[in-house]
Image (tube, rainbow, N blue to C red):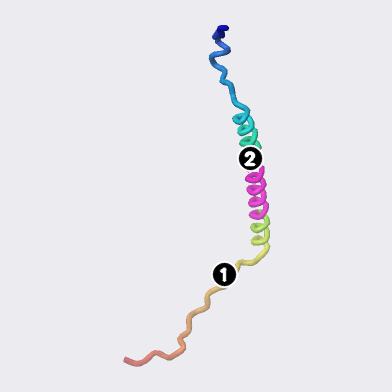
Amino acid sequence: MTISAGKQNLLQTVRTKSQVKGDITNEAARAIIRIEAERQSAKTARLREARLAVQALQPDAVPERRARTRKDPPKPR
């Protein structure tokens, strides 16, 4: 029995059952990781917006500096 090698047969590779299952698992894992990353970035953006909104409502937290006063009078030299 001879196998004729045509253009279609040369470029196709036969994938084993374990390779196909591995590819399905990889695709599923990557999809889960991508979804989690998107959720995390959305949460980060939402929290950033909330923090900026709260900061806009609050007055400046930096108090004005008072003039320094000496505790002891200067000693004569």
* Predominant SS of the magenta segment: helix
- Which residue occupies 68% across, 62% down? 57
Circle 1 packing at 10 Å, graded few (<14), some (14-19), many (20+), is few
Horizontal and vertical percent for residue 3?
56, 9
Residue type for callout 2 = Ala
Q: Nearer the viewer, mark 1 or mark 2?
A: 2
Quarter that holds the N terminus = top right
Report helix, strand or loop for mark 1: loop
Identity of the residue furthest to the bottom in this view: 76
Circle 2 packing at 10 Å, graded few (<14), some (14-19), many (20+), is few
Residue 8 badge: none
Identity of the residue furthest to the front in this view: 1
| Magenta run includes residue 35 | yes
Residue type for callout 1 = Val
Q: Is residue 64 above or below residue 71?
A: above
User: In the figure, residue 4 lies in which quadrant?
Assistant: top right
Give the magenta range.
29-48
- Viewer-side residue, 27 vs 73: 27
In terms of sequence position, does the residue under pointer 1 or pointer 2 come before the other? 2
Horizontal and vertical percent for residue 27?
63, 35
Horizontal and vertical percent for residue 9?
57, 13
- Viewer-side residue, 41 vs 34: 34
Residue 62 badge: 1
